[in-house]
Every structure is written in structure tokens, then in C-alpha cells.
Amino acid sequence: MIRRTLDSCCEKGIVGLVLSALVFSALATGAVRTLEFVVVEWLVAASGLLWVARTWLEPHRNRLLFPPVGWCLLLFLGYALFHYVQADVEYTARREVLRLLVYALLFFVALNNLHKSEWTQIALYMLVFTGAAIAVYGIVQMIVEAEHVWHFTRPEQYKGRGSGTFINPNHFAGFLGMLLPLCLASVLTGRISQPMRILLGYSALLLAGGVAVSMSRGGWISTSLALAAIVAVLGWRKQFRLRGILLTCIVLGVIAGFLLLSPFAQDRLRNINKPGTMEHVGSRTELWGAAAAVWKEEKLLGVGPGHFDHHFPKYRPERLQSRPVRVHNDYLNTLVDWGLIGMLLAGLMLGTMVHGIIKSWKYSQRTSSDLSAKTSNRAAFVLGSTVGLGSIALHSFVDFNLHIPSNAMLAATLTGLLAAYIRFATERYWVAVRMPVRLTLTVAVGGVAVLLMSEALGQTREYARLEASQSAESFPEQVKGLEKALQIEPNNFETAGMLGEIHRRRAADSGSTARKVELKKAAAWLRQAIVLNPYDAYSYARLGMALDQLGQTDKAGEYFDRAEQLDRNGYLTVANVGWHKMHIGEYEEAKRYFERVSPPLEYIVQNPGGTPLKQGQQLTEQEFHDAQKAHGTNTFEANLVNGGLVAHRSEKTAQDLARHIRAVYLPYINEQLRDGE
């Protein structure tokens, strides 16, 4: 009796922990930052430990459900661990594999502990209402033109778009796109009370509104196709055909009204193929082209977990000066990171999942003996979750939704709950929890849980030291904080690089003796950063700058050459190489590099307005600013002819560098060239 009571408490604890992890991750900007993901790791690990406890408390009641998709997932995890051991950048690979372990553990926990109808319904309500609340936040953001998500400032490029509790509106749309079909299916075909049906109906409207204000074209398309799938299924079943027709009319009316009343949405569609606008899709295709080039380096095994970000600068198009981190296509990202083998394993998981859905579909429907006109929560969940997962799968062709923890966790949970319906089709996938199975499960799940907790603790300590370093009021305190962070996480190449850079900058404000000491420290830390990540062009360039200042110009040239090989089109790398050329007196070469970054600005008048300017007239930077002062900034239109590489970056540091190049470096170089003549 005590064992059964404890087992029931553990079961409820698992449900609470899983739902807490899902809700928290969605509210905490998708759990993309270290501290938020640490909370997720603790919650999921704790749920895993409670699952292990249940197998020891009531082994006869808690059989293990292990469908084919579970074996495929274990196969992929084994491949991931093999890849991690061979990774070039251990820190990046470890962080990526840890995320996979969180998603896999969440899948198995949901599969074996949340499959009861009461828990499935509670999960549905909690997730839908959370999504509706986030959607309201996103709608308000668009109405008041908010620039913040909680206390975080959103990038300028997302202005005018709702993103709810996410930073990126596309990920906001992906999250809601999974929940909307689930909500609609429950409203239209679920066996629920009338008040709950009304609440879910309003929630569906809010979810649809959230997708709309995200201004995510991928979200619009994937969600529209998901709704079309819901309508098709309802139309196929005679008892729900009228509801399908009504839903179609409502959806078409809402879409038409939204497009007619929103100029911003019209611009998002109108400028899709217009170069030079933020809505242009050319940057996506250029990024995919670079990703394909990265994949060709290692077609079979891929470049490594999370390693696309390290290899991308080598193939960077000139227009993509930002750090994309991901490919903006989950399938291509999988191919690049994990290779053909990883892609085949992922395809095998998808195939077994689809086969399981097809096999269990008819067993989730009410039979004629059940009076088929009645509704069914089981059928509603299978329909809604299947279409919701289909929605995120479609959206993932143009974005990296499944690399956002909250979205990946929601997808893993829905997949686990959906896979559990195979139990209605056959008993063959139930495994009795005898002692060998129990021990194996305890070692595997307990080991993963302990690993996640251990890593979460280390990440928390490292994060605290890094934060202390950033808020330090003196240079020694800043260095001390970074050194302690590196002691906690010795493989974090970014921390080593930061230590090298702050010592190099400190040298500029030091006397001759101290300057040499600081530069030597900088060089040592930067060498360590290069060992930890041999693909970081910035570490090579900064090491080259330190060696230049130490008088070791020949050796510095080797590091600058390597930096240029790794990031030939990166504006900061090109500027650093230009600085090196200027430092060693190669002024012609220095001028060429600096003008690639930010050449003397020229403008062409497009519309002179009421000014004496003529259409097509060329203006220098000074003439342009003089004309603005004389006639006003909005009286005429002029386009920049060539802003260089830095023209594709709008943040203050990049523009300050551009101005410094034009105001200081280029005039100095031109003066030296004139003197040399």
C-alpha cells in the first residue's frame, strides 16, 4: 500500500516536472540562454530519477513501453556520442549532445509516464493555455511596438513583429504552430465540457492571432497547411463535415482581413524577392549555399555536433556579416553537422514514427459501436499532435525551430505521447521490468540524469563567474573572474579568447615594461583559445596583433594569413588584416583591405525632391551630409553606392569601426602613400 502511494506521488511529480520544464522553457525566451537551460536540465533530470524510482516501487505495474522509434532514437544517441568523442571543438559538441540527451530523456519519460488519458488532457490544457498567454503578449508587443521581451532588448530587425516570450518571432510562430492544431482538434472533435470547449475555442483564436502577428512567412505557410490538414480530416468524416466547412470559412476570412488591414504583412509578402530589403529571402539561399559547401568537407559523417557555426566563416558570402549559428533549415543543418549517416538515422526515426501513427490511427478512433457521432479525446489528441508535429516539420525547412530548446522539448513530448498510442494497436512493445531490465534502466536513465545535473551545476558556476567578470569594477577583478570561469570549464574557447583580448587591450594603456608583460599574457591565452577552437579566425587575428606589438611581425603574418583563410569575407577579419598591413608599412595592401570593409562613401540621388540636386547626381559623404543640413533629411532620396562589407551590419560597434577607418586609417594611409611618392 505504501509502495503504491509512493508510486502515485512519483507519477504526479513526473507530470509536474515535465509540464514545469515545458512551460518554463517557453516563458524563458525559449531556454536558449545558459541559465534558463540549466533550470530545464534540473527539471528533466529530476523527472528521470522519479521514473527510475517508480520502476523499483511498483515494477509489476510500471511496464516499459518501447516502440521502434525508441530504438531508432537510441541508435542516433549512440552515433552522437561517437561524434562527440571525435569532435574538433569539444565544448561545442558537448553542449549540443547535452541538449540531445535532454530531449531524448523527455521523450522516454513522456512515453512511459504521461500516456494516461487524464495526464494527456492536463498536459494539453496546460500547454494550450500557456501558448495562448504567450500569444496575447505577442499581440500586445505588435500593437504598442514594444522593443523588449521581458527585460531583454530585441534586435532592430524584429521591429514591428510580435515574438511573445521569444526573442525571434519565427520561433514564436513555430511554438504556437504546434499548439494550434492540438487546440482546434480538441475543440472540434474532443469529448470535453462546454465551458472548456469555449475556453479552448478562444485560445485557438489567440494562438492563430499570435502566428499572424509574428509576421513569420514560414509560420504562416506551415500553420495554414496544418489548418488545411485539419479541415481535410474533418471533411472526410461525415459527422464533422459541417464543422470543417465553418472552420474553412473562418480561417479564410481571418487571413483575408489580416492581409487587407496590415500594411506590414503586405510588405513582408511584397518584398520577398526584392534585394536590399529585410524581407528578401536571398540571405536564406546564400546561407544554404554556404552550408552545402561546409557539408562537402565531410559528406558521410558531417563536420561535428554544432560545428556548422565554426566552419561557416570560411564560406561566408559577403552579404552575410552576422553570425548565423544555425543553417536556418533544420534538415540541412542535420546533414551538415551529422552527415549522411546522421541524416539517415534521423530519417529512420521519422519513418518509424510515421509508421507507428498509421498503425495506431484506427485504434484511436471511435468505432461504430461507440456511436461514431460522438467525440473522442483520444482521436482529437492523435489528430492534433500529428498535425502539430507536421506543422513544425514544415516550418523547419526555412528555420531552425528544432534547435530552440522550448520548441524541441514540446516536439519531443508530443512525439512521446503520440508514440504511446501504439499500445492500443499491439501489446508487443511492452517490456516487463524484471531485474535485468530494471538495472539497465537505472544505470542508463540515472546516469543521464546525474550527468545532466552535474553539467548544470558546472554551467551555473561558470555563468556566475562570467557575470561577475562582466560587472567587475577593476581590471584585476575582471581577469580573476574569467580565470575562475576557465578553471570551472577549461574547454570554453570563448573565455580563453576574452582573457587574451582584455590583456591585449590593457597593454595599450600600460607603460613599456608592463605593456610587454600584458602582450605576452594575451598571446598565451589566445594560443590556448586556438587550441580549443582551431576555426576561430578572431583568435588568430588578435594573436597576430599581439605579436605585431611585440615586434614579431613575421610570426604575426602567419596568424593573419590563417585568419584570412578561415574568414575571408568577414568585415572584422579583413579590417584586422588591413591593420597588420598598415602596421608593417604595406600601405597599398592596407588601403585595399580597409576599402573592402568601408570605402569612401558615395551616394546617387534618386529623387531630388524640391532641392537643386539632380536625379542621378553623385555625392561624396561630405556633400551628402551638407545637402541634408541645407535641405533637411527627408526632402530628397539618395542611395548608397557601395558601403563595403560593414554596410551589412547595423550595430554601433561595426559602424564606429567603419567611421574610424574612413576618418583615421584611410587618410593616414593616403598621406603615407603621397609621402612615398
Image: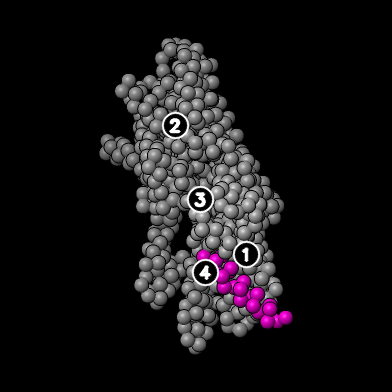
**Residue furthest to the left:** 2
x and y percent of residue 521 in the render?
51, 79
* Secondary structure at numbered mark 2: helix
Find residue 572 and report its image quarter: bottom right
Along the polypeptide, which appears first: circle 3 or circle 2? 2
Which residue is painted at 49% across and 61% down in the image? 652
The residue that disc 1 covers is: 600
Report if residue 124 is visible in the image: no
**Where does the magenta region start and end?**
656-677
| Amino acid found under the numbered disc labelled 1 | Pro
**Residue furthest to the bottom:** 513
Disc 1/disc 2 C-alpha distance (Å): 48 Å
Along the polypeptide, which appears first: circle 3 or circle 4? 4
Disc 3/disc 2 C-alpha distance (Å): 38 Å
Tell whether position 671 is magenta.
yes
Closer to the eye: label 2 or 4: 2
x and y percent of residue 421 in the render?
47, 29
Disc 4/disc 1 C-alpha distance (Å): 32 Å
The residue that disc 2 covers is: 208
Asked if disc 3 and disc 2 are in contact, CB closer than 8 Å, the reply is no
Along the polypeptide, which appears first: circle 1 or circle 2? 2
Disc 1/disc 3 C-alpha distance (Å): 23 Å
Query: What number is the disc on residue 634?
Result: 3
* Secondary structure at numbered mark 3: loop
Within 10 Å of the Cα at label 3, are there few (<14), some (14-19), or many (20+) other Cα atoms? few
Within 10 Å of the Cα at label 4, are there few (<14), some (14-19), or many (20+) other Cα atoms? many
Asked if disc 1 and disc 2 are in contact, CB closer than 8 Å, the reply is no
| Amino acid found under the numbered disc labelled 4 | Gly
